[in-house]
Image (tube, rainbow, N blue to C red):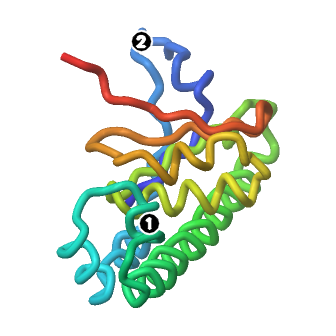
């Protein structure tokens, strides 16, 4: 899992050479390590790529409890890592008047990503779109946009070719 910190506006600005500035990459290896849990692997082998609601609301109550623990722990630790990384970046850039740190792009596994998005949306009171996160079978190169100003969540779909 990776975090890109930077401003969407800043990433669209050209530098003196005419190249576009890239967001700052913050590798957070412990986010990937958090997905490597025996119970998580067992659940994924059984359920596979599916909306997280399939993990949290299925007929096997033992699987439901295991999913709540595994995905909940991952979501909480991801949120802690995101807060830490963004706080550190904000302190580092406190002396500038730029928009740095207002955009956070978080990349993770298709099943773990929605659990982190759900936790982040709830923490930011962005409840409009929670069902979207719960019910979407997140595909490769897809994600969620959590808009704090509009207090909603939308799906970032990969382009259809």
- Residue for badge 2: 17
Q: How dense is the environment of label 1, judged by Cα within 10 Å: few (below 14), some, or many (20 and up)?
A: some
Image position of 47 with respect to 13: above or below: below
Give the x, y percent position of residue 155.
49, 34
Give left or right: position of 80 versus 31: right
Q: Say if 132 sits above or below 17 in the image.
A: below
Q: Residue at x 43, y 42 (%)?
A: 143
Residue 113 position in % (x across, y down): 43, 57
Callout 2: helix, strand or loop?
loop
Residue 13 versus residue 71: which sits nearer the camera? Answer: 71
36 left or right of 124? left
Q: State the residue in front, 117 or 128.
A: 128
| Quadrant of the snapshot with the N terminus | bottom left
Which of the two discs, 2 and 1, sits closer to the camera?
1
Query: Which label's residue is closer to the chain start, 2 or 1?
Result: 2
The residue positioned 49% from the left and 12% from the top of the image is 16
- SS assignment at label 1: loop
Residue assigned mark 1: 28
Between the C-alphas of marks 2 and 1, the distance is 31 Å
């Amino acid at each position: 899992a990776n975090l890109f910190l930077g401003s969407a506006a800043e990433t669209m600005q050209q530098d003196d050479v005419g190249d576009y500035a890239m967001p700052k990459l913050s590798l957070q290896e412990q986010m990937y390590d958090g997905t490597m849990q025996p119970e998580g692997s067992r659940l994924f082998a059984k359920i596979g790529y599916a909306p997280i609601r399939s993990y949290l609301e299925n007929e096997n109550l033992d699987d439901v409890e295991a999913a709540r623990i595994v995905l909940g722990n991952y979501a909480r630790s991801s949120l802690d890592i995101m807060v830490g990384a963004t706080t550190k970046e904000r302190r580092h850039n406190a002396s500038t008047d730029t928009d740095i740190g207002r955009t956070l792009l978080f990349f993770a596994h298709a099943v773990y990503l929605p659990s982190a998005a759900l936790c982040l949306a709830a923490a930011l009171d962005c409840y409009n779109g929670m069902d979207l996160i719960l019910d979407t079978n997140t595909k490769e190169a897809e994600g969620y946009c959590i808009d704090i100003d509009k207090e909603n969540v939308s799906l970032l779909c990969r382009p259809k070719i």
